Image (cartoon, helix red, strand yellow):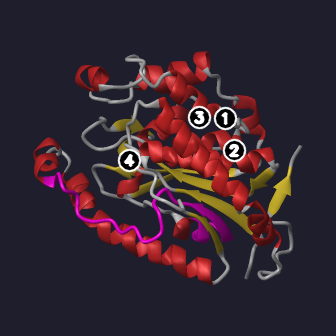
């Protein structure tokens, strides 16, 4: 039975996530807020601004600190084990330099989930983020902590890394939570298929402490490609509205180039605007006969 709940699913991909930011900002500018969201890695790191209704914020602080050694880079990696400096990027930026709107986030009725990977058990962890508390940014950091360039994050009694190791496109998770229809934002173009990690020979010795991570990396291509098929099936059935880049984004996951960030962000904006009426029709569709509106307008 249809519940009438519509969610949004946000893939990761490092700075490919600027494409996602462009789409989310267009949604916010048009007062389109859905019932729930789930984000993986950059998907939740940037997507949390959708629940706090801060259009432009993710692009703004990434451009501002793109070449700031306090924010990210090899120096931070060598000194702390994290390419993105944990304290500066996840503590100082949201509390001092580009303040995250805690109150709006807390007041929003939107369900919000971050996907992480438990490095000891190999399990996916789906953490619901209702309120900003002491662990809030640690859950987001954990979800976005890529193997090798980040250390596992201890939060919630677990050691966690990048959620993409467990569930790269958590559409079926949202289905399990009662979301009959979903907007899915991918950061890879149509026709993309994930292949085996080329640097596994290098990653294995670096990750020898975490055999479950190595196993997950080896399984990931098959998992990811299977999830792409699930997305296509639900899109064909009218259960999913899918944004995927109309042309490859061709941007490094860790780029420091502000122009590249803006280019990818603008591609997301342009494609969202181009398909805005199509999206509105999907959200207003009676195909599922929902008892409540699946998208709400908030001023």
Indicate which label's residue lies in the foreground, 2 or 4. 2
Contact between marks 2 and 1 (CB within 8 A): the answer is yes
Task: Check disc 1 and report its element: helix, strand or loop.
Answer: loop
Tell me, for residue 86, which label it has, or none: none
Residue in the picture at 16% in, 54% down? 200
Q: Which residue is mark 1?
A: 56
> Dot 4: few (<14), some (14–19), or many (≥20) neighbours within 10 Å?
many
Instruction: Please provide percent x and percent y for residue 156.
Output: 45, 40
> Dot 3: few (<14), some (14–19), or many (≥20) neighbours within 10 Å?
many
Residue 44 makes an appearance in the image:
no
Q: Which residue is mark 4?
A: 162
Q: Which residue is mark 2?
A: 25
**Nearer the N terminus, badge 3 or badge 2?**
2
In the image, residue 129 sits, relative to residue 138, either above or below, namely below
Contact between marks 1 and 3 (CB within 8 A): the answer is yes
Between the C-alphas of marks 3 and 2, the distance is 10 Å
Reply yes or no: does residue 197 show up in magenta. yes
> Dot 2: few (<14), some (14–19), or many (≥20) neighbours within 10 Å?
many
Instruction: Please provide percent x and percent y for residue 59.
Output: 58, 34
Residue 38 is drawn in which quadrant?
A: bottom right
**Nearer the N terminus, badge 2 or badge 4?**
2
Task: Check disc 2 and report its element: helix, strand or loop.
Answer: helix
Q: Which residues are magenta?
A: 174-200
Between the C-alphas of marks 3 and 4, the distance is 19 Å
Tell me, for residue 58, which label it has, or none: 3
Instruction: Please provide percent x and percent y for residue 12.
Output: 46, 51
Task: Check disc 3 and report its element: helix, strand or loop.
Answer: helix
Between the C-alphas of marks 2 and 1, the distance is 6 Å
Residue 289 is drawn in which quadrant?
A: bottom right
């Amino acid at each position: 039975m249809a519940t009438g709940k519509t969610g949004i699913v946000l893939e990761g991909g490092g700075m490919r996530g600027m494409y996602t930011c462009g789409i989310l900002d267009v949604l916010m500018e048009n007062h389109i807020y859905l019932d729930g969201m789930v984000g993986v890695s950059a998907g939740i790191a940037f997507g949390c601004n959708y629940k706090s209704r801060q259009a432009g914020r993710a692009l703004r602080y990434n451009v501002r600190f793109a070449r700031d050694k306090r924010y990210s880079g090899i120096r931070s990696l060598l000194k702390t084990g994290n390419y993105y400096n944990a304290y500066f990027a996840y503590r100082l930026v949201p509390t001092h330099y580009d303040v995250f709107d805690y109150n709006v986030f807390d007041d929003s009725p939107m369900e919000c989930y971050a996907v992480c990977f438990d490095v000891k058990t190999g399990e996916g962890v789906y953490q619901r983020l209702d309120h900003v508390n002491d662990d809030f940014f640690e859950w987001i950091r954990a979800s976005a902590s890529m193997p090798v360039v980040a250390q596992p994050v201890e939060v919630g009694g677990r050691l966690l890394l990048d959620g993409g190791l467990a569930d790269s496109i958590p559409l079926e998770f949202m289905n399990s939570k009662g979301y009959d229809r979903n907007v899915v934002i991918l950061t890879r173009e149509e026709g993309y298929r994930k292949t085996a990690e080329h640097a596994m020979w290098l990653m294995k010795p670096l990750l020898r402490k975490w055999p479950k991570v190595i196993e997950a990396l080896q399984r990931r291509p098959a998992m990811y490609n299977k999830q792409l098929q699930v997305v296509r099936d639900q899109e064909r059935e009218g259960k999913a509205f899918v944004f995927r880049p109309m042309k490859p984004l061709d941007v490094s996951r860790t780029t420091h180039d502000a122009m590249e960030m803006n280019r990818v962000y603008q591609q997301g904006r342009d494609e969202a605007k181009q398909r805005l009426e199509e999206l509105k029709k999907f959200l207003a569709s009676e195909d599922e006969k929902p008892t409540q509106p699946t998208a709400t307008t908030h001023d």
